[in-house]
Image (cartoon, rainbow, N blue to C red):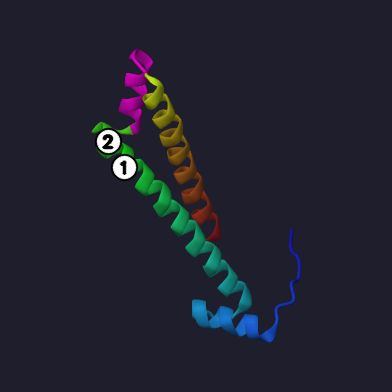
């Protein structure tokens, strides 16, 4: 779906200045790309924090949870799983816009 959006001259100028792009479309794509990278880094940080806490990968943790799980592990499992899934989504979205 494509829609035309009117930007004020000041906003367009600021957009070009921030992104160093020459077209509005390229500038918007650049902002979207940057936001996806920011989100990707957020989820990478969450994943690395859990890997450090449990000293294992998510797959290893998932296997361990099948054997034994407490309330803290269950919450961490759900948060870790969300981060892994969101990271995969961010990487896919980045591929699509590049």
Q: Residues within 10 Å of mark 1 (few under 14, many from 20)?
A: few
Give the side of residue 18 with respect to residue 28, left or right. left
Look at the image and say whether residue 67 sits in the magenta stretch. Answer: yes
Q: Is residue 6 visible?
A: yes
Look at the image and say whether residue 14 sits in the magenta stretch. Answer: no
From which residue to which does the magenta span run?
A: 58-69
Secondary structure at numbered mark 1? helix
Quarter where residue 28 is shown: bottom right
* Residue 97 sits above or below residue 88 on the image: below
Secondary structure at numbered mark 2? helix
Rendered location of residue 14, percent (x, y): 57, 82
Instruction: Tell me the distance, in whole angstroms, between the alpha carbons under discs 1 and 2.
Output: 6 Å
Pointer 1 residue: 49
Give the side of residue 2 with respect to residue 21, left or right. right
Helix, strand or loop: magenta stretch: helix
Quarter where residue 16 is shown: bottom right
In front here: 15 or 27? 15
Q: Residue 98: which numbered mark, if any?
A: none
Pointer 2 residue: 53
Residue at the (27%, 36%) spot, across then down: 53
Q: Residues within 10 Å of mark 2 (few under 14, many from 20)?
A: few
Quadrant where the N terminus sits is bottom right
Mark 1 touching mark 2, by CB under 8 A? yes
* Residue 4 sits above or below residue 62 on the image: below
């Amino acid at each position: 779906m494509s829609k035309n959006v009117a930007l004020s001259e000041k906003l367009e100028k600021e957009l070009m200045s921030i992104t160093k792009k020459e077209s509005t479309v390229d500038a918007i794509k650049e902002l979207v790309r940057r936001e996806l990278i920011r989100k990707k880094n957020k989820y990478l940080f969450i994943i690395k924090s859990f890997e450090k806490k449990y000293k294992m990968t998510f797959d290893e943790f998932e296997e361990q949870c099948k054997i034994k799980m407490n309330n803290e592990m269950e919450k961490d499992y759900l948060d870790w799983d969300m981060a892994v899934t969101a990271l995969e989504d961010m990487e896919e979205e980045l591929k699509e816009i590049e």
